[in-house]
Amino acid sequence: MEYLILLAAYLVGSIPFGLVLGRLAGIDVRAAGSRNIGATNVTRLAGKKLGALTLLCDALKGVLPMVAAARLLPESGGRELWVTLAGGAAFLGHLYPLYLSFQGGKGVATALGIFLYLAPVAALLDLLLFIGVVSNWGYVSLGSLTAALLMPGLVWLLYGSASKALLALGVGALVWLKHRENILRLMRGEEKGWKKNKTDQSGNDQR
C-alpha cells in the first residue's frame, strides 16, 4: 500500500497544470515567455486568473497525496514518515514529470503546498520572508532561493521532526539545483527583476 501511494503521489505531482490551463487559453506556455510550465509564466502569457489557478493547482498537488496517505494508512509510528515521503514524491513529480519527458517546473509552488500541510507555521514564516525579499530586491528567484535555504531550519526549530526537516533539506537542494541558471544570472547582475518581468515576456519565472 505504501509504495502504491508513493507512485500515485508522483503521478499526481507530474500533472502539468500550467501547460493544461495554458492550452485551454490557446497558449503553449513552453513555446513563449520563459518556456516554463509554472504559475509565473502562465500569468505572463495568459493573465492573472489562470496564473493564480496554476499556483493553486500546483500547490494542491503537493497537498492531496499527503492527505490521502494520512487517511489510507493505519495509525502507527511510521505513518508520519510515509505521509512526508508522499509529499516528496509529488514534488519530484512536478520537477521531473513522467508526462513531459521528465522536464518540469522549479517546484516552488508545490513545495509551498507541501509545507503548508506538514509545517504550516514554518511555511507561513518562510512565505513572509519570500515576499519581503521579492518586495525589497525585486527578484522572484532570490526570494525562492532564500525561502528554500531557510525552510529546513525553520521546520526543525518549530517542529523538531527529523523526517520533515530532511524533506525540507532535500526540497531546498532541488530548488537550488533547478535555479542554477538564475543563480548565475544573479551573480552576473543579469537577472531580470519582477517588475520588469511583468512587461517583458523574455523573463525567467520561478515556479
Image (cartoon, rainbow, N blue to C red):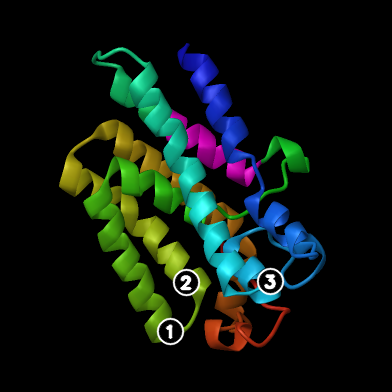
Q: Secondary structure at mark 2?
A: helix
Residue 188, horizontal then vertical, whole percent: 61, 80
The mark that comes first in sequence, 3 or 1, is 3
Provide the secondary structure element on which disc 3 rests. Answer: helix
Quadrant into which the C terminus falls: bottom right
Q: Which residue is mark 3?
A: 46
The residue pinned by badge 1 equals 137
Question: Which disc, if any, is residue 142?
Answer: 2
Calculate the distance from the C-alpha at mark 2 to the C-alpha at mark 1: 8 Å
Q: Position of residue 150 (x, y in %)?
A: 32, 58
Residue at x 25% of width, y 62% of height? 125
Residue type at mark 2 is Leu
Answer whether labels 2 and 1 touch (C-beta < 8 Å).
Answer: yes
The amino acid pointed to by label 1 is Trp
Q: State left or right for residue 203 relative to residue 139.
A: right
Q: Which residues are magenta?
A: 86-96
